[in-house]
Image (cartoon, rainbow, N blue to C red):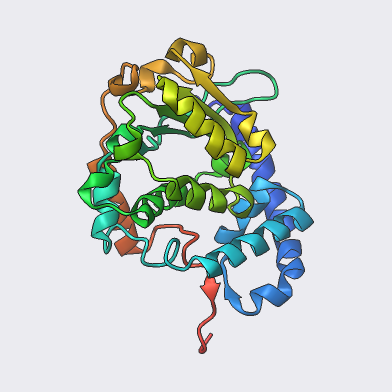
Amino acid sequence: MSSSPTTTATDKNDETTSSLSSQLLPLLRAELASELDAVAVTDEQLVPFLRWKPNVARAAQRVRAFLSWKRDNPHLFDETLRLSQDDPLCRVLASRFIVAPPELKTKPNDPNDKGGSPVLIGRLRNNDLRDGRTVDDVCRALFYTLDRLLETPASSEQGIVILHDLRGFSPSKNADLGIPKTLFGALFGHFPVRIKAIYLLNAPFFFHAFFQMVSTLLFPAKVKARCKFIKSLKEIEDVVDIDLLPRDVGGNADEFDVEAWMEEQKQRELNGTLVTMTTIGPRSSNE
């Protein structure tokens, strides 16, 4: 006799949220009726806003903010954001300065935290601005990664955890103030995503002042409060399974195969199975 799959608390929570989103979707479309007359947007693209906030008024406010940001920044997040047609995007992502292994999720932490949040690994030392990449190239790579994460319900519902390994970071080689300004200016208040926590590992002494300046200028107070400097992965062993982190950042896993992941995304782009927020935009004249 075969046993049925075990239903976890996270599964039940996902089912509840999915059901609630389905119930609220017609109400959200009604709330946005005037805006959506001129904008092409699918149900799949609206649902993340309801997962982010299962409240029609709040979700509609975020949709409007997203549409406004997208209109003002057409070159950063549009239908050209495709690995299959953007060589600089491929080159930047292949450098592994930011990766989001699909199997890497947070652990259940307490009765109010069921775990399952995607974990994004940053290594600014791999962001070599001397190789010709521009601020826009770097930001587009980050937005592409975010767009893929938004295909995962947990990114909107529970939030993303970011682990930045700052070992080897060089301000002159790896940083440009235009990157956090563009990235966080978009992320906060526009995208249907939560930042659950940011852990800053192995930060050199001079990074503290740099982070203080950037976070004061760009971070909402509640996000700044979720940022924590750590000296060892043991400080977050209750949050993430260290065995699943790559050895390059102090874990025990092999490096994430970003080339295989990129090839998979290219195939999805070409066969039409990619679910993306980039196609939200003005309706064509024949629609």
Residue drawn at x 46%, y 59% is 276
- Residue 75: quadrant of the picture: bottom left
Q: Where is residue 246 in the image (x, y as percent from the top left)?
A: 31, 23
Q: Where is residue 218 in the image (x, y as percent from the top left)?
A: 59, 44
Query: So how many labels did they put on this image?
Result: 0
Residue drawn at x 73%, y 55% is 23
Q: Position of residue 280 (x, y in %)?
A: 52, 67
Relative vertical location of residue 270 with respect to residue 171 in this rendering, above or below: below
Residue drawn at x 26%, y 24% is 254
Residue 148 can be seen, yes or no: no
Q: Which residue is at the far bottom?
A: 286
- Residue 71: quadrant of the picture: bottom right
Q: Position of residue 213 (x, y in %)?
A: 55, 36
Q: Is residue 128 left or right of residue 206?
A: left
- Residue 36: quadrant of the picture: bottom right
Closer to us: 40 or 21 = 40
Residue 273 can be seen, yes or no: yes
